[in-house]
Image: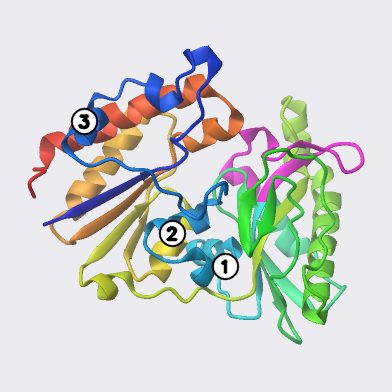
Amino acid sequence: MKLIYVAIDGMGDMPIKQLENKTTLEAAKTPNMNALAQRGKTGLMYTVGRGIAPESDAAVISLLGYDPFKYSTGRGAIEAVGANIEMKNGDLAMRCNFATLGEGKAIVDRRAGRSLTTSEAEELAEATNREIKLTSYPATFELKATLGHRAVVVIRSKDKPLSGKIYNSDPAYAIVNGLGVAQEKVDMTLKTVNPLEDTKAAENSAALVNELIIKTHELWENHPTNIKRAAEGKLKANVLLTRDAASSIPNLFNISEHYGVNFAALADMHTELGIAKLAGMHATLLPPPSGNLEHDYDLRVKALLNALPKYDCFYIHLKGPDEPGHDGNYTLKTSIIEAVDKYFFGPLLKQISLKD
């Protein structure tokens, strides 16, 4: 028997007035998913807890059977593992966004208009690693652009270990009981990073992050990449937003050994790739979106079918509806859900036997 476990990121929703009070999933035409639901069992679960809108790391850990309150150490460490950045316990890792800062501390856009290319982000990251030195505490750092506006940074102390017990500079997420949680009402101002605990390690960590944010803003404001973007009418990527600090690597049990199966993961993002690696899965990062949904989902179906004979269980994470959900674009989100149904489940169901 085989298990194909598909997580469709951000597909859930609230009723939307413009969709006749339907959710995007209710409004979307999804004959293939409907057929699966009719043949199977349906239910409701809270990944972390009722009333909590968790970030991807805690949600995915929970979906795979790990207690996030026990196993999660902060998304930063997971992102570092997924991005192949060397990290050891006592280093400080954070998930970051290249964002747009306006006057004062006003954040114009948390994702630089979603128009930042990975190559542009890499140019800014390379300049940062080359030109900035941290002086508030003896430490080095490595900033790595991953996909579009996304990045991860690891700060390595030359002296005593650092602490992940610090606040976010990104106002959209708070730390609640050690987990990153999305905020319903967001004050779009750049936050000063303060310690979450009264320790020298947390104090030093907060100072280093604040220093890095100030220095990257000064470097990026008039960097050639941003001068070119501004000339093209695009938002500058002139500030680094940090969140989900971690100073230790999660110690996940080996999922294949735990359940007596051979597990593989096909991941859309570095977060899921990092979790899959830490869980002991055979992990593959799929190519980034091309803009052609039919092509992208066809590629994912082929990758799954190619791996099907080699493994027992497959975790497939489809990012699709998540981005338009964050942006409040219900029309695009509905069409992407329909594309997942038509171009992923449609061809897949024609080539597998559900009884197997």
Q: Please state which of the two labelled residues, at mark 3 or mark 2, is closer to the viewer.
A: 2
Say whether disc 3 or disc 1 marks the residue closer to the N-terminus: 1
Q: Residue at x 44, y 61 (%)?
A: 61
- How crowded pointer 2 is (Cα within 10 Å; few <14, some 14-19, many 20+) is rated as some
Q: Nearest the camera: 81 or 45? A: 45
What's the mark number on residue 346?
3
In the image: residue 105, left or right of residue 334:
right
Pointers 3 and 2 in contact (C-beta within 8 Å): no
Q: CA distance from mark 3 to mark 2?
A: 28 Å
- Can you give x and y, in whole percent of width and height, for residue 161 in the image? 71, 83
Element at label 1? helix
Which residue position is annotated with label 1? 77
Q: In the rendered view, would you say 158 is above or below 257?
A: below
* SS label for mark 2: helix
- Nearest to N terminus: mark 2 or mark 1: 2
Q: Amino acid at mark 1?
A: Ala
Residue segment shown in magenta? 97-121
Residue at which label 2 appears: 62
Rendering coords of residue 216 (x, y %):
80, 54
x then y, percent, for residue 84: 50, 66
Q: Amino acid at mark 2?
A: Ser
Q: Is residue 289 magenta?
A: no
